[in-house]
Image: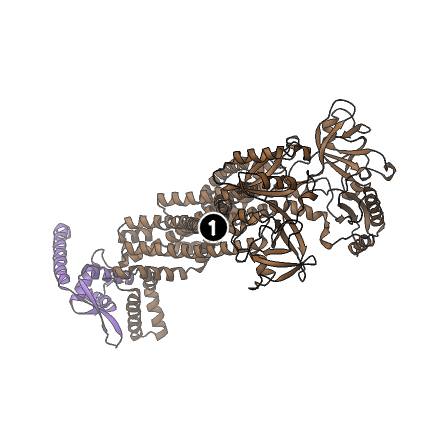
Chain colours: A brown, B purple
Amino acid sequence: MIPSPDEIEEELRYHVEARAADLARRGRTPQQARREAQVEFGSVVRYVEEGREAKGGQQSRRMTAGFATAWRSLCRSPLFVFVAVGTLAFGIGVATLVGSLARSVLLVPVQYPDAERIYNARLVAPAFASIQADLPVSALHFATWRQKCTVCEAVTLIDGGAYRLAGDSDRIRTLEVTPEFFRIIGTKVQAGRVLRSGEVGPMAPRVAMLTHAAWRTRLDADPHVVGRSVTLDEEPTEIIGVLPERLSLPRGEQLGELMQFPPAIDMVLPSRLDVAQTRPAGFQWSVLVKVRPGVTQARAEEELHALTGQLAAATRVDLRARLVPLQQQLTGGVQQPLQWLTIAAALLWLIACANFGTLQLARTAARRKALAIHATLGASRRDLLWQTLSENFLLVAAGGLAGLGLAAVGLWQLRLYAPAFVPRLEEVVLHPGVWAMALGVAAVAGMAGTVAPWWRMARLEASQALQLESRRVGLEDAGERRLRQTLLFGAAAFSLALASVAALLGVSFAQVLYSDHGFAREQISTLQISTPAAVTSGEARRDLHGQLLATLRSLPGVMAAGSTNRLPLQGETYVGSVGRVSGQKSGLVSNWRMVSPGYFAAAGTQLRAGREFAESDRGQRVAVISERVAREMFPNASPLGQMIFQQGGAAARIVGVAAEVKAKRIDARAPLLVYLPDWLNTATTPKAYYVLKLAGDAPNVIANIQEVVAGLGMELPADRIAPMQRFVEQATEARRWQSFTLIGFAVAGVFIACLGLAGVVTLQVNRRTAEVGMKLALGATRRQAARALLVESLRPVWLGLLAGAAVSLILGTLLQPQLYNVSPHDPFVLLGTTVVVGLEVLAAAYLAVFRAMRLDPAQALRAE
Amino acid sequence: MSQPIMQGTLDLLILKAVSLGEQHGYGVLLRIEQLSGGEWAIEQGALYPALYRLETKGWIKSDWGTSDNNRRAKFYSLTTAGRKQLRLEAENWRRTVALMDLALGSETA
């Protein structure tokens, strides 16, 4: 029977004391005697320390004893535990969060009942299909479909809005829907009721349903909220229900980029749309259709299309109906970014696993001597294996739990920020399967690191092992070496691949952010001003806005001002064909913009040729075209002075060529643009946009602007004043998230890989202390000894970086659709990344070597 | 200067030391030194592993008892199997020594 460690300790302590007493009798002072006894016995005391871990005993006690020993053993290496658990927690946490996110968003069906029968209905105008794949639906189409579609179970219209809630400084963000909406998404309320079928249209009662989040944050989770009255835009509104917690509602551009819903929804209101009052060609509503069971998409599309055809006379545009399955509609836009996020998280996680394996390998190898002693002390191999595995288990369990916590915090933060481009965020749950997989692989990596060196031990007779260990000079088992090299190789390759993907996306983001999109951003303010309802004629409207513009220009601090019918990045609008008067060229489909004189100067849009509109042009038919229009229409001649015409309109003389301006997506090509002076604007558009170039130091300029606008009887709430920079920020938000997240992953990945490498290098140095000491004693310089070690430790790393570079080339090709203004094989980016990662790795290895080699030759030799 | 103990003889010496009466680890050490007239020094670290090994093989057994100076200590004593093993090993040893003498005798003579 093998004694317990406590017994061994007691026995050996007795030995030392007895020896000390003997020595004292021979004339040593008590202190001397004790010290001498301890020195004599020093090695034995060390064995006791290690003997603690060699605990054997009865079968029944083995498991708990193994854990207890493992726990004590870990407690003695806090740094190792910190690094190992931290690495695991980070890797597993990121993998769990991102994996669960991708799974919930991309793989799990939308959580509405019979979601596969729900479609987003769109209209396709074949004439404009080249610039706009499809359009939202007009109210007329919606009403017709709802009334006549026989294969449809329900058809609903959705719009977004914003209201002032009395007593709340933020605006309430709403969806406005018809009652069928709730039949389609099949939602049960948490409290109260959903909209009734009559509650729709211009006479609909002012009622509202709260989302769970708004109920909690804005109404303090009032349990008696149903029946309560709140004031929305000065109108009393009754709360009739609270929606459940995990309900996704369409947000942002999730139902198409032309439909802008609020980034988060607080209330759902009945639509007050009066279909009779809308234009037949006003394509601005989202429509969801739920088809009857068994009806195919093609069959439903066919019927909706037939109904659409009946409206051709009213809309005067040839249109086709198109259905997009809801799941595809919601997730299509994020599919690629999420996939890349998942790839990056997986790489990071693999790096973490490889690193954990490496750390375990290093630790176990370093403890081989201890293990050999335990074996000599009589611990059975099973005990030793069990203890090693227990340690691995404890580490993985701690890392896994910490990782789960990290993922939960991450998800909570993500929900808090709720980026509008991530759909179905409410439905995301951390998936146990994803977590278990992340954990499992980490456990396997750690086990490989612990069992491999142990296995070699186990094959040797215990005493043999001890002898071997005490004599060996830096020998390493071939299998163990292969495992170490594989792990380092993998960590290096994954790090570089991850860093390259992050670098390409980071450069793309910088390109998007800093390249010229056709307008200035600094010191530019934009205003959105609604024409008062009392002003009905186009004439009066023009006068009013002309007056406003003149007043704005005269304000101190305003350096330039101009107006337009649509700001940059705020979407395409007024699309029509443009043609050349002389010659046969026609049929280019272009965006039309109505701008005032001085607009280009205020917006910072460069003119490539000619000039912008001037007051002296007033009343004349003049036009400015964008560079692309100029190239397409007048490939061989100067466009200046040429005449163009708008479909169904009179001709206009070109006076200038303007730089390209991004109209919709900042990372897409600019559309064709034709600018006409605002005095040719015959439409009675209710809104006008102003662009003001402000002086750097203009106090109160915004207050003055508001005062001027109010003086002309118009409103300018603070949220209608926005710096141009904000539109750029909105347009780049998704990219910012993507690149920052990936760069964060990459930095973490490289750091973790460096930790692993440092661990291995330290191990190599320690294991070769004797060899190094001998070399130094024989006259080798420290530098030479260090170099030899570095060269050997780094070999798998260089190979890994080489493989990583090859993987980066492949990933780059796949990444191409996500890139902007940077080639997927851009040599500067890829080489730069490789050099940076390589230098970091080198630095980590150097630091580790020099830290480990702070020893003098004599000491190194004595280590044996 | 005391000699390091010969390889393979430690087990035999421990069995012999313990056969002379119940003894604790330090006592075993002292007794072996005594038996050799102070000529042999046992590496202290090797003693306990050997004790545990012999105990595992069932040749000696241990019991906690009280030492001369009234401290709790662990005492080792020989088992029946151990007594047999001691006889056997001693026999082997003598035979080895005799054979060695025979082999080396002519040279020393």
As drawn, which residue projects farthest toward the bottom? Answer: B70
Residue A309 visible in the snapshot: yes
Quadrant assignment for the C terminus of chain A = bottom left
Subunit under mark 1: A
Position of A789 relative to A8 (above/below):
above
Across and down, in percent, residue A173 comes to 64, 53
Q: Is residue A354 left or right of residue A164?
A: left
- Who is closer to the viewer here, B66 or A818? A818
Across and down, in percent, residue A567 comes to 72, 43
Residue A665 visible in the snapshot: no
Position of B93 relative to A693 (above/below):
below
- Who is closer to the viewer here, A314 or A15? A314
As drawn, which residue projects farthest toward the top? Answer: A583
- Who is closer to the viewer here, A398 or A342? A342
Badge 1: few (under 14), some or many (20 or more) residues near its Cα, within 10 Å?
many
Count of marks placed on residues: 1
Quadrant assignment for the N terminus of chain A = bottom left
Q: Amino acid at mark 1?
A: Thr
Position of A400 relative to A285 (above/below):
below
Residue marked by disc 1: A96
Q: Is residue A350 left or right of residue A307?
A: left
Q: Secondary structure at mark 1?
A: helix
Q: Quadrant of residue A81?
A: bottom left
Across and down, in percent, residue A605 comes to 76, 40
Q: Quadrant of residue A380?
A: bottom left
